[in-house]
Image (spheres, rainbow, N blue to C red):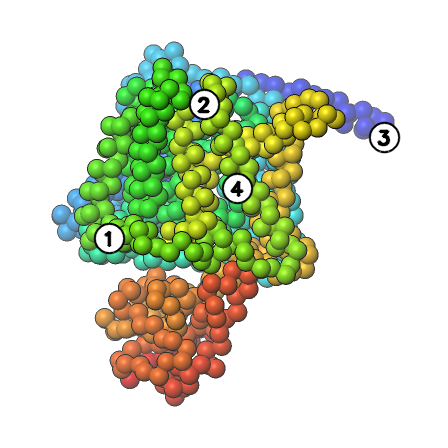
């Protein structure tokens, strides 16, 4: 009997392994599915009883807003890259741009006709738009020889795809265990599993055609294992963005020209309100669920950029993980920085990849460039400046015959000028010009800044002393990543000058070299952001050079030692780089510290919620919402904060519902407090030293002079257990 069972099992495995079928997909069938989604979207909105099924409405809304509009527009424009992953990436990106435009039109029209909450009509407007787009796509696809696509499905790819789909869900399950106060073991196992995906890619267990999907799966899994921690949003700038998005969603008197830096950043404020209207999700969950989906496109874009420029599957497959496994990618919830980098990478892919040509390429690049400008003032300006400098350097190099003058160019000065003019106009007139003034002040400060090191410069990080060997290894791994990138860029420049490499665009190499120069300068200059964020910014284009840099180092073996007679193979380089990536993530995720029994880094809230990053409990959020609903209009709210800007834990949470000009900073040792104010105090109001990146200790409010002089004896008007609100009359 056992032999029969074993024989049957073996036969089943053989049959399953060799199972193969062909699936034919007609674009018109996808269009029909789109009409069904549009019908469901409108039906859920029209039937209040069905809106109780928030999961269904959220799922339908996400598909209807995040994927289908862009796909239909690409069909209409006949932009259909052969790589399915690239098509999906473009579809999501174009959908965000379309939804922003559609939402803006709806908001303007609703405001003109005096609708109280203009964006409430978005499900109807989007549903109608999907119907019209479907009609246009059907007309354009009718009779096309490309109207049907077929692809084979066999057991191994299907099994791999299922595992990759489950990977992000495993991250959600692991965060649920942390939120419930249970063991960190599920999260540690998830971190090991994420590292294991890179190993599976190396050994070929995941088929080559699923490599971009594997990159996306690990990317979203890494983001969700952080963003799903706590029931509320957490981070820094995202609290300011939430305030603006909430104003827009509620139909307040808002325009992009209103004062306030976040009013310029439409892709993370206005678009968030539009997503909340379409999906029925609370804004908190728009930021925790939808925006990570958009941010997860960044590593995928790096994959296709590397594939276009290096024509090497291993470089393309492994380089995105240099970004994914760097802590800057996941240390805060995705907001303006990461979203802007998504569109920056998409502009690069559009420019340097030849799958889209002519006018379509220009329109696509202009669309992504505009979304970049709407996402971040600093990132977009830097990108425009580096692109302009690239054109100048390439022109000079050709003129001096440093490179072949007949080499074709892909960067257009007209495109750079378009972006520059758009940037100037937008930031001059939006947000009352505050972001334009901010950039001007930063540029002015650079002219007079002392080149000595500071705590957030590269030198500051490099010279920071750590007693723990774990921290030393972690610091070495990050330094090694930077070193490999620099070596790779230098080698590609040398190859271009000596005419050894004709595959990589010289403009891309120069662009990357300029980014490396910017990174090296941040060793001394902070640019008001710090070296860690500068490194995150340049990793939008530089990860492929890390693999090239390692290959260059390993190639030195035959030159310096007689014992090594052969050049390293691509698989050997990939193997070494995989080991490096696994080590990098094991440390950057905080797992190495947890296993060693040490305090995890302050951002590793996925392993220890109280590690130091500002994470909030439901009771604290409830206290601020009570304050928003019950405080007297224009009243001021006092919070602990001893810095010139809003940085304290309490201040960030209160800022979600109270404007900056109504928040009063209270120093722990302050003696003066005006009358007629509310005082908000949580059990962990602020850390003792905001610049301490290793250990964060919160003050005890009851031990401060401010508490003894101005809180004791005052009327406590609200208490949620973790937070209290007092009225100071």
Q: Earlier in the sequence, mark 2 or mark 1?
A: 1
- Name the residue at 24% across, 32% down: 417
Decide: marks 1, 4 in contact (CB < 8 A)?
A: no
Q: In the rendered image, which residue does mark 4 sit on?
A: 482
Q: Secondary structure at mark 3?
A: helix
Q: In the rendered image, which residue does mark 3 sit on?
A: 2
Which dot, 2 or 4, sits closer to the camera? 2
Alpha-carbon span between mark 2 and mark 4:
23 Å
Alpha-carbon span between mark 3 and mark 2:
68 Å
Quadrant where the N terminus lies?
top right
Q: Earlier in the sequence, mark 1 or mark 3?
A: 3
Q: Earlier in the sequence, mark 3 or mark 4?
A: 3
- State the residue in front, 114 or 289: 289
The percent coordinates of residue 204 (x first, y second) are: 64, 27
Residue 377 appears in view: yes
Note whether 395 is above or below 386 in the view shown.
Answer: above
Quarter of the rendering containing residue 726: bottom left
Which dot, 2 or 1, sits closer to the camera? 2
Alpha-carbon span between mark 2 and mark 1:
40 Å
Q: In the rendered image, which residue does mark 2 sit on?
A: 497
Alpha-carbon span between mark 1 and mark 4:
32 Å
């Amino acid at each position: 009997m056992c032999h029969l069972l074993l024989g049957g099992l073996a036969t089943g495995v053989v049959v399953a392994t060799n199972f193969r079928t062909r699936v034919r997909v007609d674009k018109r069938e996808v269009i029909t599915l789109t009409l069904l989604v549009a019908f469901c979207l409108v039906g859920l909105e029209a039937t209040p009883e069905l809106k109780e099924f928030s999961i269904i409405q959220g799922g339908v809304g996400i598909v209807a807003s995040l994927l289908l509009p862009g796909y239909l527009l690409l069909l209409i424009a006949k932009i259909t890259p052969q790589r399915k992953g690239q098509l999906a990436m473009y579809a999501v990106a174009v959908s965000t741009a379309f939804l922003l435009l559609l939402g803006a039109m709806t908001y303007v029209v609703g405001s003109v006709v005096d609708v109280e909450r203009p964006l409430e009509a978005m499900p109807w407007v989007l549903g109608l738009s999907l119907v019209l787009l479907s009609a246009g796509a059907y007309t354009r696809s009718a009779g096309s020889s490309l109207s049907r696509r077929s692809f084979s499905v066999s057991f191994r790819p299907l099994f791999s795809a299922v595992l990759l789909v489950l990977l992000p869900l495993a991250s959600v399950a692991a965060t649920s265990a942390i939120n419930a106060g249970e063991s960190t073991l599920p999260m540690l196992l998830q971190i090991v599993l994420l590292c294991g995906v890179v190993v599976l890619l190396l050994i070929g267990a995941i088929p080559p055609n699923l490599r971009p999907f594997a990159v996306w799966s690990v990317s979203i899994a890494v983001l969700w294992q952080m963003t799903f921690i706590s029931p509320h949003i957490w981070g820094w700038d995202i609290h300011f963005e939430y305030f603006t998005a909430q104003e827009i969603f509620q139909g307040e008197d808002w325009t992009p020209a209103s004062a306030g830096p976040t009013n310029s950043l439409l892709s993370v404020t206005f678009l968030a309100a539009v997503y909340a209207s379409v999906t029925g999700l609370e804004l908190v969950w728009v930021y925790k669920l939808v925006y990570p989906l958009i941010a997860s496109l960044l590593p995928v874009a790096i994959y296709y950029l590397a594939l276009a420029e290096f024509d090497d599957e291993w470089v393309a497959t492994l380089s995105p993980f240099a970004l994914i496994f760097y802590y800057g990618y996941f240390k805060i919830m995705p907001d303006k920085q990461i979203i802007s980098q998504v569109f920056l990478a998409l502009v690069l892919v559009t420019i340097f990849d030849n799958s889209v040509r002519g006018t379509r390429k220009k329109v696509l690049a202009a669309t992504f460039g505009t979304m970049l400008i709407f996402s971040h003032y600093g990132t977009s300006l830097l990108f425009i400046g580096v692109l302009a400098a690239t054109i100048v350097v390439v022109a000079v190099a050709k003129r001096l015959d440093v490179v072949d003058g007949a080499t074709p160019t892909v960067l257009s000065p007209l495109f750079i000028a378009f972006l520059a003019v758009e940037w100037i106009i937008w930031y001059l007139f939006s947000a009352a010009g505050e972001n334009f003034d901010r950039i001007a002040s930063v540029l002015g400060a650079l002219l007079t800044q002392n080149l000595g090191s500071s705590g957030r410069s590269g030198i500051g990080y490099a010279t920071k002393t750590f007693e723990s060997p774990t921290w030393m290894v972690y610091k070495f791994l990050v330094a090694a990543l930077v070193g490999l990138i620099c070596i790779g860029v230098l080698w590609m420049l040398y190859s271009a000058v000596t005419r050894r490499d004709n595959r990589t665009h010289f403009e891309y190499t120069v662009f990357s070299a300029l980014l490396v120069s910017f990174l090296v300068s941040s060793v001394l200059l902070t640019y008001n952001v710090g070296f860690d964020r500068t490194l995150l910014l340049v990793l939008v284009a530089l990860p492929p050079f890390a693999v090239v840099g390692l290959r260059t180092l390993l190639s030195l073996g035959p030159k310096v030692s007689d014992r090594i007679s052969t050049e390293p193979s691509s698989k050997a380089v990939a193997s070494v780089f995989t080991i490096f990536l696994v080590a990098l993530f094991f440390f950057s995720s905080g797992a190495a510290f947890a296993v060693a029994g040490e305090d995890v880094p302050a951002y590793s809230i996925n392993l220890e919620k109280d590690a130091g990053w500002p994470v909030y409990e439901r009771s604290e959020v409830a206290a601020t919402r009570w304050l928003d609903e019950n405080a007297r209009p224009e009243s001021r709210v006092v919070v602990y904060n001893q810095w010139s800007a809003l940085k304290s834990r309490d201040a960030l949470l209160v800022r979600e519902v109270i404007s900056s000009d109504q928040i009063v900073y209270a120093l722990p040792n302050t003696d003066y407090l005006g009358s007629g104010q509310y005082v908000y105090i949580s059990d962990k109001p602020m850390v003792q030293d905001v610049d301490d990146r290793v250990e964060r200790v919160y003050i005890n409010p009851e031990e401060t002079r401010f508490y003894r002089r101005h809180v004791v004896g005052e009327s406590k008007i609200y208490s949620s257990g973790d937070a209290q609100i007092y009225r100071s009359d």
